[in-house]
C-alpha cells in the first residue's frame, strides 16, 4: 500500500513575523521555518499505517527550494521518499490543491494524509479540496484511526461532541492534535535522510482564484482599566460592558 503525507514549510510559532514592504506577504528575513506541527501527526500516521500494512510512505510538498528542509525532517522520521513540487510562485489554497491533486493522481495512493490545517493561514481548505478533486472520501479533524484492509474507522472531533466515521481505502484524512505522538528523528534516521532521494517535479501551473489585497498585524490591545476595588464598582462595570464592550 502507499501512504502519502502532504506537508508544509511554515514559520515557527515563536518567530517574530513582520509584513513585507509590498504589504501583501510575510517578510522572510530572520524567519525560522519548521514542518507544520499538524503535519507531523499526518507523517506519524502514515508511518504507523505502513508498519501495519506494509508498502511505501511518501512526503509531498509544494514550494520553493527551501521546502527541502521540511522534507528532510519527514525523511528523518522514517518516510521512504520525498517529492518537491518546485514552485516559487504565489498560490492560494485552490491553486495549491489543484497542483497537489494532479501529482497525487500519478502516485495512486491508498491513503492521503494532511494536518488539519497549516498554521500560517489556518483556512483548513486544502484537504477537503484535494479529496474532491481526487474523487475520494474525506474525514477531517481525525483523532483516532482504526484501519483494516477493507474497513477504516475514523474518530473525529466535532463541536460539542465526538463522531465516528466508517469508510474504506482509498481516502483522505486530515489529522488533529491527539491523533498520535509524533516520533523524534533518531540519529540513524537523520543520517539516512541525507541519502534518501528528494525528487523535484514541476507542478501543474494553476492561477490563483483569490488575491491578497493587504496584509497587516492586528491592532494593539487597549490598556486595561480598574473601575473600582469593591462592590460599588459593579454598576459602572455593567454599564461599560453593555455600552462600550457590548458583550452584555
Image (cartoon, rainbow, N blue to C red):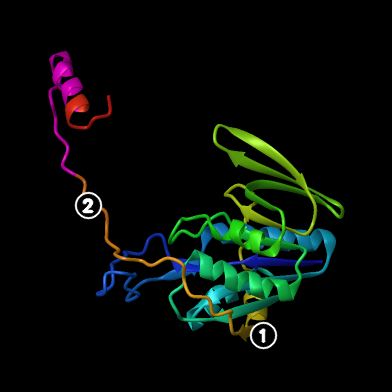
Q: Is residue 143 above or below residue 173?
A: above
**Secondary element type, mark 1:** loop
Residue 238: in magenta span: yes
Residue that numbered label 1 is attached to: 195
Q: Of the two numbered discs 2 and 1 on the same chain, state the one appearing first in sequence.
A: 1
Q: Is residue 48 above or below residue 237?
A: below
Which region is colored magenta?
222-240
Q: Position of residue 10 (x, y in %)?
A: 46, 67
**Inter-mark Cα distance, 2 to 1:** 47 Å
Q: Quadrant of residue 186?
A: bottom right
Whether residue 8 is visible to the viewer of this picture, yes or no, is no
In what quadrant of the picture does the N terminus appear?
A: bottom right
In what quadrant of the picture does the C terminus appear?
A: top left
Numbered label tally: 2
- Label 2 or label 1, whichever lies nearer to me, is 2
Disc marking residue 182: none
Q: Which residue sits furthest right?
A: 150
Q: Is residue 86 above or below residue 165?
A: below
Q: Position of residue 17 (x, y in %)?
A: 32, 65
The residue at the point 13 percent across, 26 percent down is 227
Q: Nearer the viewer, residue 128 or 207?
A: 207
The residue at the point 26 percent across, 74 percent down is 22
Q: Dot 1: within a 10 Å radius of its alpha carbon, few (fewer than 14), some, or many (20 or more) residues?
A: few
Q: Position of residue 9 (x, y in %)?
A: 50, 70
Q: Dot 2: within a 10 Å radius of its alpha carbon, few (fewer than 14), some, or many (20 or more) residues?
A: few
Residue 118: in magenta span: no
Q: Quadrant of residue 134?
A: bottom right
Residue that numbered label 2 is attached to: 219
Q: Quadrant of residue 226?
A: top left
The residue at the point 29 percent across, 64 percent down is 214
- Left or right of 149? Residue 56 is left
Amino acid at each position: 500500500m502507499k501512504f502519502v503525507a502532504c506537508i508544509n514549510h511554515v514559520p515557527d510559532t515563536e518567530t517574530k513575523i513582520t509584513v513585507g514592504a509590498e504589504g501583501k506577504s510575510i517578510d522572510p528575513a530572520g524567519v525560522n521555518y519548521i514542518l507544520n506541527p499538524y503535519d507531523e501527526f499526518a507523517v506519524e500516521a502514515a508511518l504507523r499505517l505502513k508498519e501495519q500494512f506494509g508498502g511505501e510512505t511518501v512526503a509531498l510538498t509544494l514550494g520553493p527550494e527551501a521546502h527541502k528542509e521540511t522534507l528532510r525532517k519527514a525523511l528523518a522520521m522514517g518516510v521512504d521518499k520525498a517529492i518537491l513540487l518546485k514552485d516559487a510562485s504565489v498560490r492560494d489554497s485552490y491553486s495549491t490543491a489543484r497542483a497537489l491533486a494532479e501529482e497525487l493522481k500519478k502516485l495512486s495512493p491508498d491513503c492521503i494524509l494532511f494536518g488539519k490545517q497549516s498554521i500560517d493561514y489556518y483556512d483548513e481548505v486544502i484537504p477537503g479540496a484535494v479529496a474532491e478533486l481526487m474523487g475520494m472520501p474525506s474525514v477531517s479533524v481525525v483523532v483516532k484511526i482504526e484501519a483494516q484492509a477493507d474497513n477504516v474507522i475514523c474518530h473525529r472531533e466535532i463541536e460539542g461532541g465526538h463522531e465516528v466515521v466508517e469508510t474504506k481505502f482509498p481516502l483522505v484524512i486530515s489529522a488533529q492534535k491527539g491523533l498520535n505522538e509524533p516520533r523524534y528523528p533518531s540519529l540513524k534516521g537523520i543520517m539516512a535522510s541525507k541519502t534518501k532521494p528528494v525528487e523535484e517535479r514541476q507542478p501543474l501551473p494553476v492561477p490563483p482564484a483569490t488575491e491578497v489585497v493587504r496584509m497587516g498585524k492586528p491592532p494593539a490591545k487597549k490598556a486595561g482599566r480598574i473601575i473600582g476595588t469593591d462592590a460599588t464598582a459593579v454598576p459602572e462595570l455593567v454599564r461599560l460592558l453593555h455600552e462600550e464592550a457590548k458583550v452584555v
